[in-house]
Image (cartoon, coloured by chain):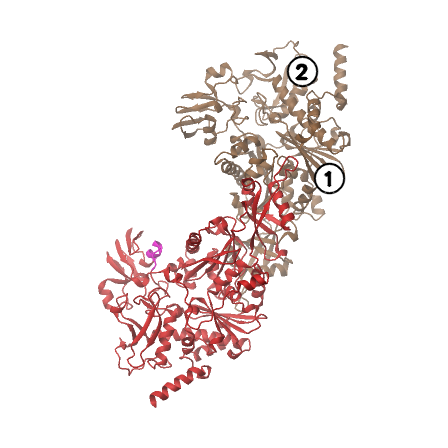
Chain colours: A brown, B red
Amino acid sequence: MHKILFLPHQKEIQVKDKEVLLRAAMEAGVHINASCGGAGVCGKCRVLIEEGQVEGGISEKLSKEDLEKGYRQACLAAVVSDLVIRVPVESAIDAEVLNLAAVPRKTARIQEMNLDQLKEKGLFVPPVEKKYLELIPPSAQDNLPDTTRLLSFLKLVHDEHRLEVDLSVLRKIPDVLREQDFKVTAVLARPVREKDGRTRIINVQPGDTTDHNYAIAMDIGTTTIYGQLLNLRTGDVLAQYGDFNGQISYGEDVISRIVYAEKPGGLEKLHQVVIETVNKIILRLFRHARIDTEAVSTITLAGNTTMTQLFLKINPRYIRRSPYVPASTLFPPIRAVDLGLAVGDHVTALFYPALSSYVGGDIVSGVMGSGMYRSEALALFMDIGTNAEIVIGNKDWLACAACSAGPAFEGGGIRFGMRATKGAIEDFSIDPVTLEPMFITIGNVKPKGICGSGLISVVATLLETGVISNDGKFNRDLKTPRVRAVDGIWEYVLAFKDETQIDRDITLSEPDIDNLIRAKGALFSGCMTLLEEVGLSIKDVEQIYLAGGFGSYVDLEKAMTIGLLPETDPDKVRYVGNGSLMGAKMSALTNRIRRDVVEVTRKMTNFELSETTSYMDHYIAALFLPHTDLEHFPRLKTRLEARKSLRTG
Amino acid sequence: MHKILFLPHQKEIQVKDKEVLLRAAMEAGVHINASCGGAGVCGKCRVLIEEGQVEGGISEKLSKEDLEKGYRQACLAAVVSDLVIRVPVESAIDAEVLNLAAVPRKTARIQEMNLDQLKEKGLFVPPVEKKYLELIPPSAQDNLPDTTRLLSFLKLVHDEHRLEVDLSVLRKIPDVLREQDFKVTAVLARPVREKDGRTRIINVQPGDTTDHNYAIAMDIGTTTIYGQLLNLRTGDVLAQYGDFNGQISYGEDVISRIVYAEKPGGLEKLHQVVIETVNKIILRLFRHARIDTEAVSTITLAGNTTMTQLFLKINPRYIRRSPYVPASTLFPPIRAVDLGLAVGDHVTALFYPALSSYVGGDIVSGVMGSGMYRSEALALFMDIGTNAEIVIGNKDWLACAACSAGPAFEGGGIRFGMRATKGAIEDFSIDPVTLEPMFITIGNVKPKGICGSGLISVVATLLETGVISNDGKFNRDLKTPRVRAVDGIWEYVLAFKDETQIDRDITLSEPDIDNLIRAKGALFSGCMTLLEEVGLSIKDVEQIYLAGGFGSYVDLEKAMTIGLLPETDPDKVRYVGNGSLMGAKMSALTNRIRRDVVEVTRKMTNFELSETTSYMDHYIAALFLPHTDLEHFPRLKTRLEARKSLRTG
């Protein structure tokens, strides 16, 4: 056995001889960037061996300088002695940025839930309600059982019938009834529909607690998890908090999570880790709002299919294997404590249904949150991330598809790519003469890398200023030290070594741009193919909803410039923000959503784009900036032509 | 701290100074008879101090000889040194007798469940069924989620609709479907009524397992617990096993259990102990029948109200306090593993509903088992034990009541009384001339004491032979060493010291007889009062059902001789045996019972006899052998008169 000390975490762990260093870090709960899942390909898992020896860990992904300093690739290094390992700053996860007040982007039009409308329509009826009762205490002439007494008063006073009682209520009812002289509050959980079953009495509390009825809404993302604490009396959000999904240390994307889940004990570990993250968020919400566990009556959750299965400890193995079959797309209400959630034992967890392996509950939740399922207008809903999901339709029909864009939008496959956390370059412009950059980073600190929205900004700017051409290649004739070839690979230097946090030049290279082009090509092709499948074109789309963390930060004009989005009137675009969280919130505030969502999923047709022949044609046509066919981008075409004539003129 | 070694158990425990010895034994899980709950009154908890010293423990309940030998009363003795304690043979619990093949008594007419009739009527439909399916495996053209696939085939092939799926099924469905090429068996749990909810898919198993569908039926008695393993394909009982309820060590009757449950940690302890007993039985049933846990689909249980509440860990505090309110009389289906039961996590435990604090699920179960709720004939159902429960009625109406008979029928309050276990005198006759006894014991071994049915046999015989008179006093003029007065208390010697296992004379004294008279008086008065309340007399009763362990062993004629039962045509009497277990079995074999039982409990009117003025009058009139009014006992009157004339003649 060898002892490893990870810095700056100060975490120590014992591992057996020849253990892979990346695995040891996972075991210790230390996060090291590793977007290829330990395959040795991405080169992101570099760590500094401060003391001791490793075997291997050397690859061409590491610079000579790095190798000399003692950096090794953790996924390729075997532990052969006691070690002191320093994890470099680019691997640090910093949840702080997740909890910054969201800054709406420039002209962004934000789609929000309309609580007042919900109230006006009488739909503000949460799935869990509280009813206060003053029971007549038992006597020799009337010694009904406690439960029977409660049930008969609920019928008499509140016209509640067809009720059933949870065991946890039976366990507390004798003492609770007698605590405040048979004055009690009953907590009632509704079935989806009346005909689906009975209303359950899930809790009884002494006295009148009807003023204190709360819910938690959760978005279980692959990368980030957000929770909201909701007041079910008013509909207000009392607190919101986000954190990175603890599963990140076990793989960056759903595929590598599934791979990890297939290892012995892997599924249990991933389940446990995500529950820990959620409990951390719940605890923080409780503390922030100063309410206690007992006052929370329900928890609603939305996540993609893999995240939901891992959350529920359901083997996700077949999600990643053709023909891509999930275990289930509907999930029963589940007692939250059975999942290990840090809430009262009366709380039921309600999960959003999914549609398929790659169109999950997060998308369904977003569709509900956006309201497009209730509208006459034809809408296009996009959630852009590693997997991009697209939904087209209106209140009468819905079609959806997922396409694998690759990790570029989340900073993956890009040498200095990173998640949208502190130190990420998120916006960028260039001096058209000197070609010197100006950029801002998240948190306004020295840069560590480029996040997805930054990447789009950089590439769009380089394109519009002619630093790169339509095929993503650098103009070889520019006179600036910023554009250079290293080992035959052309790149643009965003920040020189001294200006960075990472002690290396931050650059964007042609292979990076290629990766982005492939990612945006996949997404664009997905939109086109799906529209074609339903016999429509982009011109028919009356509304575009952009969901997801990435979708919320992206600069519309620049996204259209690179051909990520079809060029449309920006007024048609609405930012949904975290649509998954919005949908989860809605289902906590109105039980009607739980009924509607079943109908919505029945209306939704899933298209497997990989089964569609035209997808590849669209894809290849889209491997250009913005596209081989500039007719799709009339405004950009005009600008480019104007610039050309300016230069040549 | 002191160390105590209990013999012959070889159990050792550490206790703090001055701990009560009885409590130390409880802690160690060593049973010592203590029918007064540690009050120092019954004198049964004598133990031999083989090594070390105790403080106190001396009382007039112990003979001089016992005291000299080193016997002390465990409930009065404080531990002040390390000890070696020998628990005498009369305290030994021996479950063996519970599992002897039941010997029907002489002319006994046994009421049994008619399985064939059930099958003929199409009612042999268990609450849990298995359905075999051969699914079409998924393909690129048909990649429905696993659960959706299963549901659609269940609908198509078996016309099963309105289904819901348990989380445990979602967790196993991906692998189970693929284990035998999408050939699976689904296990379906029915709701009580279709309109009460959906059928739940509680398990999926690879291949065709429809031949292996089993249930466990359980009777949770205060003293004994019986379990049956049932084949749900055939209705056959594959194994049956009984054991003493482990809670005995914490109090002999329901009241002392409730008292114990009110102590800190007491409820948890009693819950845990009864679950342990049940798991022991389940394990033995599995072993005996060589089936595995996975094949058991459901467990049905019946117990009195206190036993049910303790089983479910529901505070029973208010059951023993006026106005005697139970927490609930209806219990939801409960996931068995949540209760700690050693069955699969798909198994739901179904509990019989109760009627009131003292007419519990065991009685309701017995009423269902007897079939009286379906019959035109007016029937009287009696379950005789420490608490005797009486039900009168037929298919149209039912009235019930409980009366506390005291522990005499189970050997309590009788100096040499004991439970119906090995060594208990169970039948008795006397030579009318020499007055020498002849008796048989359970297990045919040297006697340890007298059980309830033995007690009735002895008293009836002593009465018929004139050894005692109608008021239960001994005839002072008899010339036999068997009848004697010790310290002014008259008694009959059933067995002299040398003939016993306990190294003491086994006797029956006038105070013992008084206790029996009070017990049978309470029961008789209960019957009379309840009949009177519903405007009927004993002559109207067309059928008598005797339930309970005691009820099954009792000699009818002798029970009528002492006035325990009203004198009726023995042909009217049916022995139900363990009615509670029979009812539990029935509800495992036919889901219809679960529906019917709700209606039956609605039809049942509970009478609180203590609230009835005539109860005490009837009771006082019944404090005679058999009764102050011999007109109720015409046959006995004739016999007694014949004997009198024989003597005087």
Question: Where in the figure is residue A640, as x and y percent of width and height?
Answer: 74, 17
| Nearer-the-camera pick, A192 or A106 | A192
Dot placed on the residue nearer the N-terminal end, 1 or 2? 1
For the question of whether residue B356 can be seen, the reply is no
Q: Main secondary structure of the magenta part?
A: helix
In this picture, is B400 found above or below B617?
A: above
Please report the bounds of the magenta region as a residue range: B23-31
Q: Is B1 one of the magenta-colored residues?
A: no
For the question of whether residue B148 can be seen, the reply is yes
Q: CA distance from mark 1 to mark 2?
A: 42 Å
Question: Where in the figure is residue A198, as x and y percent of width and height?
Answer: 61, 54
Q: Which residue is mark 1?
A: A397
Describe the element under mark 1 as helix, strand or loop.
loop
The numbered mark 1 sits on a residue in which chain? A
Quarter of the rendering occupied by the C terminus of chain B: bottom left
Q: Quadrant of residue A353?
A: top right
Judge from the rendering whether residue A45 lies leftward or rightward of residue A584; answer left or right: left
In this picture, is B593 found above or below A537?
A: below
Q: Which residue is mark 2?
A: A468
Pointer 1 and pointer 2: residues touching (CB < 8 Å)? no
Question: Where in the figure is residue A6, as x and y percent of width and height?
Answer: 44, 27
Q: Answer few, some or many: residues within 10 Å of disc 1's Cα (few below 14, many 20 plus, some between 14 and 19).
A: some
